[in-house]
Amino acid sequence: MTVKNYVYLFEEGSQKMVNLLGGKGAGLSEMKKIGLEVPPGFTISTEACGDFLKTGTFPEGMLDQTLVALQKIEEQAGKKFGDIKNPLLVSVRSGAPVSMPGMMDTILNVGLNDETASTLGTLTANPRFAWDSYRRLLQMYGNVVLGIKKEEFEHEMDSAKTGKGYRSDTDLTAEDLQTLVVKFKEVYTRNGKSFPANPRDQLIGAMEAVFRSWNSDRAKAYREINGIPGTMGTAVNVVSMIFGNMGSDSATGVAFTRDPNTGEHRLFAEYLVNAQGEDVVSGARTPKSIDDMRTELPAAYNALVDAVEKLEKHYRDMMDIEFTVEKGKLYMLQTRIGKRTARAAIRIVVDLSSEGIITREDAVLRITPETLTVTMYPQVKKSQAIKSLGKGLAASPGAAVGSLVFSSQRAIELSKEKKPLILVRPETTADDVRGMAVSKGFLTQKGGMTSHAAVVARAMGKPAVVGAEIISVDPIKGTLTIGDRSFREGDILTVDGTSGEFYEGEIPLEESVATEETGTLLSWADKFRKLGVRANANTPEEAVLARKNGAQGIGLARTERMFLGTERIKIVRKMIMSESPEERKAQLELLRPLQTQDFVEFFRTMEGFPVIIRLLDPPLHEFLPDREEVISLINDLERKEASGSELQEGEKAKLTDLRSLLTAVRNMAEFNPMLGFRGCRVGIVYPEIYEMQVRAIIDAAVKVKNEGKEIYPEIMIPLIGHENELKIIRERLEPVAKDAMGQTEVKYEFGTMIEIPRACLVADRIAKYADFFSFGTNDLTQMTFGYSRDDAEGKFLASYLEHGVLQADPFASVDAEGVGQLMLMAVERGRNSRPGMSIGICGEQGGDPYTIKFCHSIGLDYVSASPFRIPVARLSAAQAALEQKGEFVLVNS
Amino acid sequence: MTVKNYVYLFEEGSQKMVNLLGGKGAGLSEMKKIGLEVPPGFTISTEACGDFLKTGTFPEGMLDQTLVALQKIEEQAGKKFGDIKNPLLVSVRSGAPVSMPGMMDTILNVGLNDETASTLGTLTANPRFAWDSYRRLLQMYGNVVLGIKKEEFEHEMDSAKTGKGYRSDTDLTAEDLQTLVVKFKEVYTRNGKSFPANPRDQLIGAMEAVFRSWNSDRAKAYREINGIPGTMGTAVNVVSMIFGNMGSDSATGVAFTRDPNTGEHRLFAEYLVNAQGEDVVSGARTPKSIDDMRTELPAAYNALVDAVEKLEKHYRDMMDIEFTVEKGKLYMLQTRIGKRTARAAIRIVVDLSSEGIITREDAVLRITPETLTVTMYPQVKKSQAIKSLGKGLAASPGAAVGSLVFSSQRAIELSKEKKPLILVRPETTADDVRGMAVSKGFLTQKGGMTSHAAVVARAMGKPAVVGAEIISVDPIKGTLTIGDRSFREGDILTVDGTSGEFYEGEIPLEESVATEETGTLLSWADKFRKLGVRANANTPEEAVLARKNGAQGIGLARTERMFLGTERIKIVRKMIMSESPEERKAQLELLRPLQTQDFVEFFRTMEGFPVIIRLLDPPLHEFLPDREEVISLINDLERKEASGSELQEGEKAKLTDLRSLLTAVRNMAEFNPMLGFRGCRVGIVYPEIYEMQVRAIIDAAVKVKNEGKEIYPEIMIPLIGHENELKIIRERLEPVAKDAMGQTEVKYEFGTMIEIPRACLVADRIAKYADFFSFGTNDLTQMTFGYSRDDAEGKFLASYLEHGVLQADPFASVDAEGVGQLMLMAVERGRNSRPGMSIGICGEQGGDPYTIKFCHSIGLDYVSASPFRIPVARLSAAQAALEQKGEFVLVNS
């Protein structure tokens, strides 16, 4: 059996070998390769780690190879490991293929013992530094390799300081530290261990410890949370120690090749003269601006500037660098792709592309949709110190701070004082829309990702946390209770709709930062994408925003929102409670001019673009008040009566009205409203409703057309499951449209939502009567899975994700495996029957990156998303097209 | 252009030409063909009718062909049309391919005028008969051909009688009738018309009128109701008049070749000497028993007996015959397949088969499932005089009479008096089951075909009308209101669950008549069918009935019924409201011995057969009381408090309990419970429930096996939509089952309901963890269509059927076009992944004939239906198999 090669000198490795050498080792090798100065060293591969962890011993040949490599770096460094005259010291550092910051162990100064420490003091003319280094080795080795508790060493350190009346570690002198070394050795003895004076034994122990640290509890937990496979293993890097604390010609520092906060193209770096890495990290001394290095250490500075430029060109990205200057010479200790803010990420890719370092395709592919989203909403500034009060569903992204208010009416009153408000409700209803309009954010106890609060919040672009079951809201008493804590009107709360968390008091926010570069990036994305991007917009205001964000039309305008508002809801309720078509028609006639006006504004805003208007969809009883609320009002009056007080005339009349309202509410109640009397079913049974809507649409179109504007109305019938539904409705509505046109010819289309499983199965038949299809993936997912989204999100979806029943929330991203089959079927059958027909997707998932890629792959014409999601949709659509081309590899973002 | 042939002499036609000649014409031709004596005559085809109706004139050649045919029958009859000496008279009769009794016109005695009438009087030595015949022709012709109102003729008739002081038409003498003929001609004149004395003109007018009558309003309405295409048209039969009233050697009568009430094999006939057909029909004279004819008209009798035998052998069915004897000679005037009662239908096919006239396959094919159903339940004896109070959904077949009762508790009290009861409720709940058990039938105001009342009624085999929205039930006041009528406890009502109607008072019922022949027929069916037939049974009693009705196992035993009952529901509610798994387990441990006992009885009953037990399926909140009910109880107490009365200690405690119950009810409420937290979702989140159930099943199996009985438990997990659900549940439950077995090895299987669209799409993946599939078509239909059945049936399904959106109720019979695609997909993918896996269907549609045929066609292994539907399922399964063989043609039933 041949022995495997486990050990690679830096000059033997490269970035491509990252899986074998880990991130740190590969980076050092790559830097060596491109001619940068790195300390002599080598890497023991992740493969060795895997073999070690299987057997508990170093695999065959590894130790020999290590010793051979050690000899090579001794030669390069001109020092010898364990040599009393000129000792080589090394660091033994972990380094996995994927960054796991702070999760695994590292041991510095390996090679020190009583003799070499003394030599080091002499050679550096700094005995304090030498004994301090030795003390550190003893401490790290004892803890990491031999498992002695950290506290025991710290206790000795404290005793040493207290005995001398010192305040700080730095007060300890070389002599104090030498004494401490003795004390530390006593700690070893007390624990039945001993410190190996032999450097080789130190090295072996350190290597074993680094390997073992791959399976420490914290490393395992980190991998689990971040989805990193446990089979990967860590490499071990053995690197000659370079000292930045060898005097005023030595220094240490960190650098980013560009500003990681803004993305600006400038060297973003800090350094400390006569210092070691941990001095920078610990914050004990304030680092200097890199500009000072130019004069203070000019040669090293120039070498750094050269290195930075070389690294960026080579890695084609902004890099994060650690460096040390030892006696005027610059050494690169680490490099990796630099972390950056979302805003910087966008600027960097745009600049890199403008500078010719990456292509525009690369730029577009490198920005994740999440990164883009973050730049578009205010965000809570994350800090470990802040603890949230609780977590609900992250229903609408962004964050807001405001004072609590428990009713919409009260919100409207308080808004006059210009106070920022957070509206807290058990759940919201149509009655809350005005209150929501004057509030900054929302928190509800109940409801899911498609609850009223969630949908309205997303449409308004305001943060919302919904279904926070941990809280208890009593809107009558005006209290929000969490456990034994209680909040009242005026208390300050911060709501984070991006994470679903909410906080007591004001948490600092980072404002949204849509920049010029974002616009540039999206304009590039638009060139690459094949999918059209439309917006879901229910009001003219939303349509304006949609255009601003780049929408190429409206994919879904829900007309039911136009049935709301104080005046309209009164008419609508009368219409619903009508007992004859004539009565119903009379009420609808009152609504018609209002609807027409809505559409006029819509069409004006969307001049030149198609506008899909969906006819009334929800069950009519949604426009009636809540049953328990009515009962409660009745009971209040009845209780008053029972207590002997005479009811006033007005109260008596109200009681009568309430009782007949209750009868109507009861009669219209449904067992499963989502699957009940709604959508085209209402349209078939009460033809006058859709007739009014179509007349209003065409009247508006005629008016706007006569103003000289081009408009393309598309009328969409919801909830079609059988072709006859569409056939009948279309046959009824076409004459209405023709009649409304009069002299003005308006081009318009009739189409349907595909949101019922059966519609996909018979899409060929439905396509005979539909000019276009638009997937309603929310309902389609609900019916295909048999999940009521609002119920699932409150009752079992979390548990399903936790138990691994589902890998992802099927309402957030399309379930390609199940729902996707139906969608593909609908596309194929629909186009088979009506070649080239326009097919899109509207609703929540239309703005989801994974879903957008899926839609691209099945050949949809466009996606439609909420106005705030348009930029993300444009980016995702471009990525879908580019990834399909297969020419570009996503490096990082 | 060649002229088409429109006219067929009886000797030129046959039964096979029924579409061209109509039923009457084809029957006459066929009789002629097999050598029976029919009057000379011919048929003008339905094709001529179609052409006539298109243009308004006889098609080219038709009249000439008619006159040629007329000449032929003149020769055969030895008489001449219009001849004064020996006139031929004809009847001009309609006759469509499909029977439309009384819907179209017929004119008799064509050929009479002043001269021929006089001759006829002389020739028959009966001038009164001749003038009466002439008077009738004038009347019929005037009305049918010329559109003169019937009343004008009747008025003249009345005047004639009043003038003479007569009471009855028969008092009119020959002279009176001759005078009336003059008066009738004056009626023509008053209407600006004249009666054509020329027989040929009469014939032409009569033929046109018969053609036109195809499109009369009443004929159109009849066709619409019965689904007969309007393109079919009617034939016209021109038949020489045969007179049964030519003296004591003449007669007329009707016959069935077997008893149409019982099916007994005997000549079932009546006749009248010296009479015409309408004398038999009008009931003016009482017909004689056919036995008298044997002596009175022996030659004609023998000819009739021969004809009957010949016809049965030829048509291979029981026939309905009209005959006339003219001067001792028998003429057959019509034959068709005879209508019969359901009971007779079954006896006839079994007898015909035993007699070797038809095969057993024919016998099985000829009985429709509806016919079989009717024999199994008591039925309301239909009578035109009876008007129902109203109609609801026909939820469970059969009929019952009883006195009204408005609460289950009261029903239990009254049942001690052995009174038959009809339980009337707004809707029923689990609390009503005991009251239902002591009642004969049910009527509810709300709910659909799967409402509690409907499901329980079908399981009990008792009639139920549900969702009768016309009624208003106040259970507290104890009133049932329909419009301005009101009924109270003790009032008698008849409920017809077959039609959905309900009646005031006692309507006579026909009892169920499952006979020996039914058993014979079903035993034949069992030989032919490929599908297994299992039963849905929730109690040991139902299982007993299922075996009695021929079930080969249990396809669905719902365990949730076992959670009900006064004692159990208390435990179940505590279980549901548990706040920890431990608490929940403690309550489940109380239920376990009860469940085990249920299963023990089940297994004993179903010894030797497989039993599929479905683990808990409904949402847990179904076991909690209704929200409004709880609120109402709370309000009662609160009102009492408000009125100043001090609450008693017990009442205070109750109020506290009620309030916490209300909180639980509110917290568990769902927006769309059908798509909510139920089925395997509950099983995943609260594993202890299914664990208890599986332990109870295996404990019971072990016990029964140790009694020496073979049993095959199959455990079915409901509502699987993703393979991981089944994987996780199976992995959890298998160790439980193994543990429960101990030393006794029990063979059992794990399978799943296929009732979610997604399950069909990923059936290949699910089949990896499922030993068997069983389609739950009710839920599958709900989700595929997006219909909540209870809501659809109350709100829009009727309207959808009326508007022709749907051709049939998709919950009654499988929607082959949509849902069927998913089922086929599930079968193919499931068996692809697990070859030969057992796949069945349970639930409502499992007992529906159309669905059974569909299930046969997609290769299912068995259907499972309610115990009462088992016979129908056996029959339908056999028909599915036989029809697929394609060797048998369904003639009639």
Image: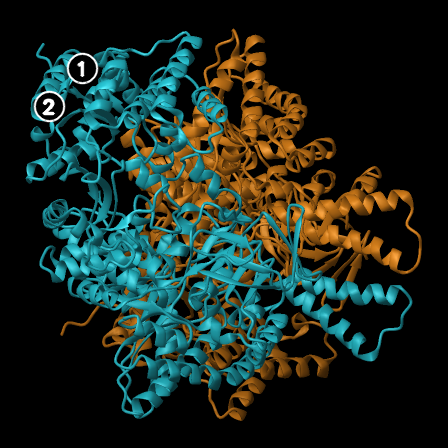
Chain colours: A orange, B cyan
Please tell me whether mark 2 sits on a helix, a strand or a loop: helix
Residue B375 placement (x, y as % from top left): 33, 60
The residue at 28%/22% (across/down) is B210
Q: Which mark sits nearer the N-terminus, 2 or 1?
A: 2
Q: Is A879 positioned to the left or the right of B629 in the image?
A: left
CA gap between label 2 and label 1 equals: 17 Å
Within-10-Å neighbours for mark 1: few <14, some 14–19, many 20+: some
Q: Which mark is residue B73?
A: 2
Within-10-Å neighbours for mark 2: few <14, some 14–19, many 20+: many
Residue tagged by mark 1?
B84
Residue B192 placement (x, y as % from top left): 41, 7
- Quarter of the rendering occupied by the C terminus of chain A: top left
- Quarter of the rendering occupied by the N terminus of chain A: bottom left
Q: How many marks?
A: 2
Q: Is residue B832 visible?
A: no
Which of the pair A306/A21 is nearer the observer?
A21
The chain ID associated with circle 2 is B
- The answer to whether residue B397 is above or below residue A545 is below
Please tell me whether mark 1 sits on a helix, a strand or a loop: loop
Three-letter code, disc 2: Ile
Q: Is B568 positioned to the left or the right of A54 in the image?
A: right
